[in-house]
Amino acid sequence: MSRFKRIDSIVEAVGNTPLVRLRSIERDHPGVKIYLKLEYVNPGGSVKDRPALQMMRDAIADGRLTKDKTLVDATSGNTGVAYSMFGACLGYKVALVMPSNVSQARKNITQAFGTELIYSDPMEGSDGAIRHVRELITKFPDKYFYSDQYSNPSNPGAHYLGTGREILEQVGDEITHFVAGLGTSGTMMGTTRRLREHSRKVLCVAAEPAEALHGLEGLKHMGSSIIPKIYDATLPDEIMPVPTESGWDMADRISRDEGLHVGHSTGANVWAATELAKRVKEGCIVTIACDRGDRYFAPMRWEKQYEW
Ligand SMILES: Cc1ncc(COP(=O)(O)O)c(C=O)c1O
């Protein structure tokens, strides 16, 4: 389907992302094809557009989200951008709970859509933001719809309905392996469930930061985090630990050698794919480009005018 169709609303631009072959990186692994699904082509610039839209649509459909309520969730990253964009487009109020030390750029992007920001303790990271939002909805149960991306089945549901289906349409029978990093685990859970319905076994591998304190934004070290309710540890065939340095170095290489400027979680996914490629003589590995590298540039001050 052409992405350059005429659309009535930005929500229609979500999904149907391209799958690109990593021809340069593949050269180190003769006999193995590696494909990257470019989720940054989604209108909010990340893989999180799919679950954010699905969670909103499902909640609107069954009356949990109404125009007199405010959608609230704990996120400083891509899900927050997606909620904010769709909230503005569909006419729903959005509030995000995030640690106060997240970058000014993150605050500016979401606020540009009219989103309310609520700050949690900077020392407690993303788990602190989750605890803060839980307190908030206990205090004001009628004010908010708590979307809760970590527990909401519509999150993996979006990847079951979209990402997994599209991958099968794009590579079909050729696929032997799928790799995705674990954040909320929605991408891994939903896509894997869809791929498991394929007639032949597709080996599904979860990439996880090797260290508790890591620099792979968007990914969670499960052993030291609040475990998402939607995460089923028995679903992946394998969990591959990825060192921060390996993810960062691979992200740099993907930019230089493939012409794709990606974020560090994408680097982690592709690094895990190359580790798999070393083990198999033949195969077709599909993984995910979660977002673009420019989301991680040092923030530029923006106050109506650019300050250089
Ligand atoms: C940049 C990035 N990479 C990876 C992920 C992980 O995706 P998921 O939450 O589906 O596990 C996220 C999720 O927030 C993300 O923002």
Image: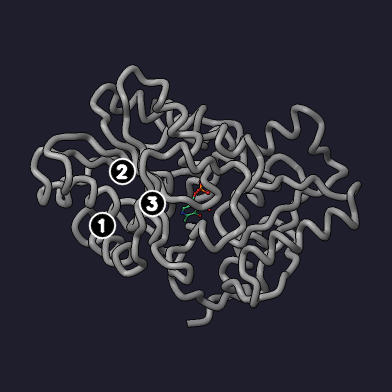
Are circles 1 and 2 on residues that touch, CB within 8 Å?
yes
Indicate the position of residue 132 as horizontal and vertical percent values: 76, 63
Indicate the position of residue 147 as horizontal and vertical percent values: 71, 45
Position of 181 relative to 103 (above/below): above
Q: Nearer the viewer, residue 197 or 291?
A: 197
Gap in Å between the C-alphas at discs 3 and 2? Answer: 15 Å
Q: Nearer the viewer, residue 260 or 151?
A: 151
Mark 2: which secondary structure?
strand
Residue at numbered disc 3:
207
* Residue kind at label 3, given as amino acid type: Ala
Residue under the image location 40 percent in, 27 percent down: 195
Residue at numbered disc 1:
254
Mark closest to the chain's N terminus, 3 or 2:
2
Gap in Å between the C-alphas at discs 1 and 2? Answer: 10 Å
Mark closest to the chain's N terminus, 1 or 2:
2
Residue 127: name its quadrant: bottom right
Q: Nearer the viewer, residue 88 or 238?
A: 238
Mark 3: which secondary structure?
strand
Residue 36: assigned label:
2
Q: Nearer the viewer, residue 288 or 246?
A: 246
Q: Within 10 Å of the Cα at label 1, are there few (<14), some (14-19), or many (20+) other Cα atoms?
A: many
